[in-house]
Amino acid sequence: MTDMRTVRSKLASQTSRVLRPRPQRQPLPGKNLKIRPLAAHRLGSAHPALTRLVDALGNNATGQILGVDRAQVSRWRHRREPISPEMWRRIIDTDYVLTRLLQVFHPDDAAQWLVAPEPLLNGARAVDVLALRGPASVIRALDGIVQGVFA
């Protein structure tokens, strides 16, 4: 396995470009904004996110990260049981963090980072912080890594 310091050093050297501010955008006119019904159905469901998590991690690891049995993950995927609002939020948050994580790290390093103590999270594991406090702290830690911050 790759040492996380080595991964961070490589990442810092790859991202040492100057970041330019984005140009200002015109505000969207409120009365012309519409959400398409088919897109609303997809966005309003946790099932696509759950499918991505299981495809990436498998039923066992997805269940462990979400704090449920792997059989429960399977029941949700096959729509045999509804997903509670709390689990819906955790699925969406985990999918978002995993997506951001894979923008920063190679998949092997990403898996290691999730379960290793992270100095930018005060020594906590990202997977634990995600479960206990949600995605904000984990995303800030990933942003810090991209910017070359070392705690």
Image (cartoon, rainbow, N blue to C red):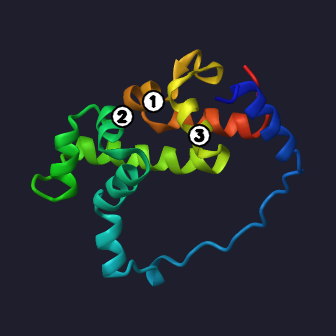
* Residue 54 image position (x, y, % from top left): 35, 50
- Secondary structure beneath dot 1 equals helix
Q: Secondary structure at mark 2?
A: helix
Q: How many marks?
A: 3
Instruction: Report whether 12 appears left or right of 48.
Output: right
Seen at 78% across and 66% down, the residue is 23
Circle 1 sits on which residue? 127
Residue 147 drawn at (x, y percent): 77, 38
The circle drawn on residue 108 is: 3
Residue 60 in the image: above or below residue 132: below
* C-alpha span from label 2 to label 1: 7 Å
Q: What amino acid is labelled 2 in the image? A: Ile
Residue drawn at x 15%, y 50% as measured from the top left? 75
Q: Residue at x 15, y 59 (%)?
A: 79
Q: Residue furthest left?
A: 80
Q: Is residue 74 above or below residue 121?
A: below
Give yes or no for contact between labels 2 and 1 (Cβ–Cβ under 8 Å): yes
> Could you tell which of marks 2 and 3 lies nearer the N-terminus?
2
Please state if 120 lies on the left or on the right of 85 as rendered.
right
Q: Which mark is residue 65?
A: 2
Check residue 69 in the rendering and tell me which mark sits there, or answer none: none
Instruction: Quadrant for residue 127, please give it.
Output: top left
For the residue marked with disc 1, what is the amino acid? Val
- Image coords of residue 21 (percent x, y): 81, 57
